[in-house]
Amino acid sequence: MTTRNPTDWKSDDMRKRIARRYAAERRFKFAGLFAVALSAAFLAFLLFTMMGNGLRGFTRTEIALQIDFPASPLLLDPANITDAALANANLPMVTGQVAKEALGADADALLSSTAWISIRDAIKADPAILGRTVTIRVPASTTIDLAAKHEGAPEAEAAVERLRKAGLLTTGFNWSFLTASDGTDPTQVGIWGAFKGSLLTMLVTLALSFPVGVATALYLEEYAPKAWWTDIIEVSINNLAAVPSIIFGLLGLSIFLNFLHLPRSAALIGGMTLALMTMPVIVIAGRNAIKSVPPSIRDAALGIGASPVQVVFHHVLPLALPGILTGTIIGMARALGETAPLLMIGMRAFIATPPGGISDPATVLPVQIFLWSDEVSKGFVEKTSAAIIVLLAFLLAMNGLAIYLRNKFETRW
């Protein structure tokens, strides 16, 4: 068998081989661009869908209701406006009577069942209105609200048109969505209770996982001897980082609730459960950041008389801290989006009042989204999308903070 030397190749053969190589490179480049474009298209479709549904969730339709308080059956002393007095005044019934006089017999179908709350808040804000006639904007029913956003039935859209011609209907930004908590009426629900629960849960998670995770990373990299038991610890930490999150929920259920009998559905338990899940991520990120510190830093510090502890805490840890913080924030962002472990410890309860502390009943944004997505009322669809937008903004803020810390404190060797 004879072999062919490169000098024996014909120029035509060389050109064909080079042309095939360039063609393969162009095909590979086209495949890469197609993959990027396809990913961008899916992302754009997701964002477009979420924004299209979610932005309507930040708005609310209101009906202007003119109330003649002196002529109404509402008998209240402006000098003694208390919660008990307002409760005894039976505001829901009075609101219904006033609405029927102003809007007609179909007032019950036009107004939200919680419209009386707006009248109660107006009286609390200014008791002097009890002596005069005022116009108070109250939330419309879910049917009217959807029709005003061009998603309702023909009968509801006809009612919306009639109210608009009378100048009684307005649609504006729903501030109560950012300040209220969960409820049964989609026109009155808000995200603040779940948002505050998420903040408290993340604070507990950070307070528990960060110091323990950083201390573990320092010990394994700077002090632990090379032995079989340290190898087992390293393998176990790497495996824990890949364990499904629901396993940590089962662990929190069995230990924190069934064994320690801690309060169910509290931010404290949610934070402790998520800390178990986040800690391995912080340990791995911390070890990688500590490894990136050059050995010459340690040698130079020891050479000028620093003790081993001073080397670690005065030189190694400050230089590794940006990488540790970046990994910590990314791990916290992952914990913020978890639902399964929190469902296991009971954080899916109906929470109508924002939690006052870490031991109070609370829920978090992912669980609130899950609960709203399971509601029958169509009005909760846009509220679910709006809550997803809030969660995405929270996650983007945390990831943006991680990028900022990395760029600000990163040291290039």
Image (tube, rainbow, N blue to C red):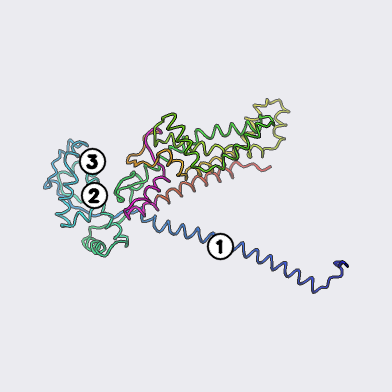
Q: Which residue is mark 1?
A: 37
Spatial CA span between label 1 and label 3:
55 Å
Disc 2 on helix, strand or loop? loop
Q: Is residue 39 magenta?
A: no
Q: Nearer the viewer, residue 275 or 228?
A: 228
- Residue 80, quarter of the rendered image: top left
Residue 288, position as x, y percentages in the image = 63, 40
Disc 3 on helix, strand or loop? helix
Residue 371, position as x, y percentages in the image = 37, 47
Q: Residues within 10 Å of mark 3 (few under 14, many from 20)?
A: some
The segment highlighted magenta reads 358-386
Which kind of residue does numbered mark 2 sit on?
Ser
The quadrant in which the C terminus is found is top right
Which kind of residue does numbered mark 3 sit on?
Lys
Q: Which residue is mark 2?
A: 113
The quadrant in which the N terminus is found is bottom right
Residue 47, position as x, y percentages in the image = 46, 57
First in sequence: mark 2 vs mark 1? 1
Q: Is residue 377 left or right of residue 249?
A: left
Residue 24, position as x, y percentages in the image = 69, 66
Residue at 19% over, 46% down: 92
Q: Which residue is mark 3?
A: 124
Q: Is residue 72 left or right of residue 289?
A: left
Residue at 45% over, 32% down: 256
